[in-house]
Image: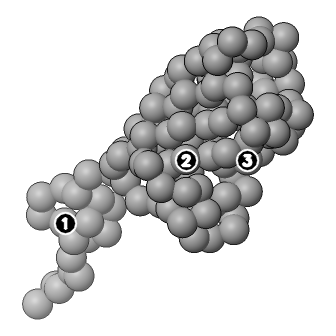
Amino acid sequence: MANIRYTATGKRKTSVARVILQSGTGLITVNSRPFDAYFPRETLRMIIKQPLELTGMYDKFDTLVNVFGGGLAGQAGAVRHGISRALINMDLDLKPKLKKEGFLTRDSREKERKKYGQKGARKRFQFSKR
């Protein structure tokens, strides 16, 4: 591989991640910061590594990520989605394995908007008869 780049976009909640995979040693950089510094929780780091470890590509590619919007959990999900899509751009034979684990499904759950005359999206103000 002569430094070929595979790009993809991942989304989760309100987060959007642009992912670039290029041949390397397994270094992950998020918003120009080391992966461990950007995602302090081990569970979030585990979520992001899942597609690379499943396909056995963890030490074969450097991952450059630009992510914005939402919180850390949403961003981690967006990065995982983006990495999975980039792996498919690289090798279409990985698709069944990634699809079986659910890494290609865009998790479309988003926060429901607050309605007027109510305390939240579903919760009402306390009813008073008198």
SS state under label 1: loop
Q: Residues within 10 Å of mark 3 (few under 14, many from 20)?
A: some
Q: What separation in Å lies between label 1 and label 2 (alpha carbons)?
A: 43 Å
Q: Residues within 10 Å of mark 2 (few under 14, many from 20)?
A: some
Q: Eyeballing the image, is 84 above or below 94? A: below
Work out whether residue 17 or residue 20 is closer to the camera in this orientation and state it. Answer: 20
Q: Eyeballing the image, is 116 above or below 29? A: below
Report the side of 46 relative to 107 (left or right). right
Q: Eyeballing the image, is 46 above or below 106? A: below
Q: Amino acid at mark 3?
A: Lys
SS state under label 2: strand
> Tag 3 or tag 2, which sits nearer the N-term?
2
Q: Residue at x 50, y 39 (%)?
A: 65
Contact (CB < 8 A) between labels 1 and 2? no
Q: Residue under circle 2?
A: 29
Query: How many discs appear?
Result: 3
Q: What separation in Å lies between label 3 and label 1 (alpha carbons)?
A: 41 Å
Q: Amino acid at mark 1?
A: Gln
Q: Amino acid at mark 2?
A: Thr
Q: Residue under circle 1?
A: 118
Q: Residue under circle 3?
A: 49
> Tag 2 or tag 1, which sits nearer the N-term?
2
Indicate the quadrant containing the N terminus: top left, top right, bottom left or bottom right. top right
